[in-house]
Image (cartoon, rainbow, N blue to C red):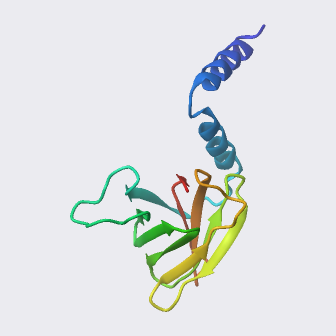
Amino acid sequence: MEPDEILLGELEAALSEASDAEDVAVVGRSLWGWRDADAGLADLVSDSAVEPLAGVRSAGDARLLRFTAEGVGIDLELLDGHLRGLVVAPDAQTLALHDDKGAAVATAELDASGWFDLTVPATLSRGSLVRLRLSDGAGGRTWTAWFRL
């Protein structure tokens, strides 16, 4: 057996034992197929499912997320099968929800102030791995980091 085959076998065994191995595989496949090198990447900087928000009374059942990139801010609320929120970015026009296979499964137009309401399709369940793509009028794109519904 070749050294590369041994290494790949050990790597496969290690990943199969990890609880997040499927997440790693999904993200890895998506990155491998990613051909949008000119797009920006917005980091997840706040998630109320991980860290309750200080100074906020209660979001109830809503989950609040915040993504930021250079010149871009996306604040959203996940509640009752909807992603609602505000995009602060120059000339932002549409926000698309992409599943773990990279397919756009829902799209919302932003109003003149940057507000949106995107309906999450029934094919995606709680815990599905997704990300958002923001498009502007000049052809620019910003992807969010992956997150779970």
Quadrant of the image occupied by residue 81: bottom right
Residue 1, placed above or below residue 61: above
Give the residue at the far left of this rendering.
55
User: Which quadrant is the N terminus positioned in?
Assistant: top right
* 58 sits to left or right of 19: left
Give the residue at the far top of this rendering.
1
Q: Position of residue 124 (x, y in %)?
A: 67, 58
Q: In this view of the protein, can residue 38 be seen by the observer?
A: no
* 4 sits to left or right of 24: right
Quadrant of the image occupied by residue 6: top right
Q: In this view of the protein, can residue 104 be seen by the observer?
A: yes
User: Which quadrant is the C terminus positioned in?
Assistant: bottom right
Q: Position of residue 60 (x, y in %)?
A: 38, 65
Give the residue at the far front of this rendering.
60
Residue 63, placed above or below residue 139: above
Q: Position of residue 104 (x, y in %)?
A: 70, 66
- Viewer-side residue, 61 vs 50: 61
Q: Position of residue 129 (x, y in %)?
A: 60, 51
Residue 86, placed above or below residue 145: below
